[in-house]
Image (spheres, rainbow, N blue to C red):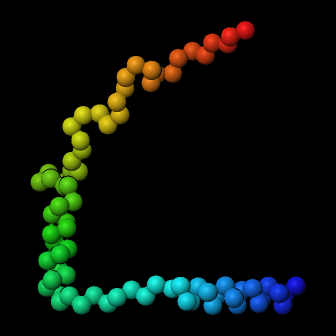
């Protein structure tokens, strides 16, 4: 049984190595990377007060039929 499991593991490792995704190196200069970080941080939604901005109104709409009604058994 150990031999069978070892063979199976070997096949799985071989498949995983062929499917492995190799990431491409970042060819940007240090200044470009720093500028991109600063640009993404300024768009993060944090205001001058340091608080995260939330939507103005409630995010869930409550209308008729959304509230749980008492269950009535017919019969």
The x and y percentages for residue 66 are 44, 24
Vertical side of 28 occupied by 42: above or below = above
Left/right of residue 25 with respect to residue 32 in the rendered view: right
Q: In the rendered picture of this protein, how many numbered marks are placed on residues?
A: 0
Q: Quadrant of the N terminus?
A: bottom right
Residue at 17 percent of width and 61 percent of height = 43
Q: Which of the 4 quarters of the picture holds residue 25?
A: bottom left
Q: Is residue 64 above or below residue 52?
A: above
Q: Residue at x 59, y 85 (%)?
A: 16
Between 75 and 35, the residue placed more toward the observer is: 75
Q: Which residue is rendered at x = 46% and y = 84% of the image?
A: 21
Q: Nearer the viewer, residue 57 or 63?
A: 63
**Residue 19, horizontal then vertical, whole percent:** 53, 85
* The furthest residue to the top: 75
The residue shown at (24%, 34%) is 57
Image location (x, y in percent) of residue 35: 14, 77
51 or 68: which is nearer to us?
68
Q: Which residue is most to the left?
A: 48
Dividing the image into 4 quarters, which one contains the C terminus?
A: top right
Is residue 42 left or right of 6 when viewed as pictured? left
Location of residue 23 with respect to 55 vertically, above or below: below
């Amino acid at each position: 049984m150990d031999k069978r499991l070892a063979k199976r593991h070997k096949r799985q490792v071989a498949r995983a190595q062929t499917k492995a995704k190799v990431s491409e190196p970042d060819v940007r200069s240090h200044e470009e990377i720093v500028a991109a970080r600063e640009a993404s941080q300024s768009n993060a939604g944090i205001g001058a007060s340091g608080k995260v901005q939330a939507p103005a109104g409630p995010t869930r709409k409550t209308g008729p039929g959304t509230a749980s009604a008492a269950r009535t058994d017919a019969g």
